[in-house]
Amino acid sequence: MLPSSNDGLLTASGGDVESMSTARISHIDALDASGIALADFSITSGSGTRYDRSGVVGVAAVPEPETWAMLVLGLAALARVGSRRAARRR
């Protein structure tokens, strides 16, 4: 969905936006009805991500499932190599 608001911050709009890439928000300016920048505000996206003047607010990095899978496979490979080396020394 395109941004919309009934509070006068954004023009009411609608529609669907599809994107095959990621956008990075590094700075947001919100203006009041007279065009003066608001010092303190926050915006919550449809996915629940909160933004303020400097971008994303308080998001802890959460590894993707693929990252966990690679970590587990890597540790399993190291364990296997270690057990083979230990078996050769006996």
Image (cartoon, grey):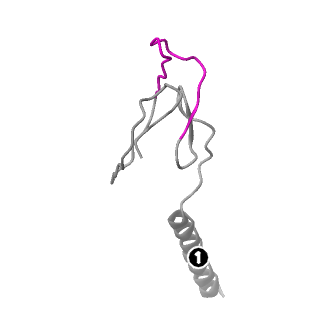
Q: Secondary structure at mark 1?
A: helix
Q: Main secondary structure of the magenta part?
A: loop
Quadrant including the C terminus: bottom right
Task: Please tell me which residue lies in front, 43 or 57.
Answer: 43
Q: Position of residue 36 (x, y in %)?
A: 48, 11
In the rendered image, the vertical position of residue 75 relative to residue 37, given as above or below: below
User: Which residue is at a point 48% across and 19% down the rendered structure image?
Assistant: 31
Identify the residue at image location x=63%, y=38%: 58
Q: Circle 1: is it few (<14), some (14-19), or many (20+) Cα within 10 Å? A: few
Amino acid type indicated by mark 1: Ala
Closer-to-camera residue (26/30): 30
- Residue at 54% over, 50% down: 47
Tell whether position 35 is magenta. Answer: yes
**Does 43 appear in magenta?**
yes
Q: Quadrant of the rendered structure where residue 89 is?
A: bottom right
Residue pushed farthest right?
Answer: 90
Instruction: Give the magenta part as a residue range.
Output: 27-44
Is residue 35 or residue 51 the one in the foreground? 35
Q: Find disc 1 in the rendering and name its residue.
A: 76
Q: In the picture shown, does residue 43 fall above or below 9? A: below
| Residue 55 or residue 30, whichever sits in front | 30
Residue at the location (61% across, 43% down)? 59
Query: Could you say where residue 72 lies in the image, as x and y percent from the top left?
Result: 58, 71
**Quarter of the figure with residue 57:** top right
Q: Position of residue 2 (x, y in %)?
A: 40, 42
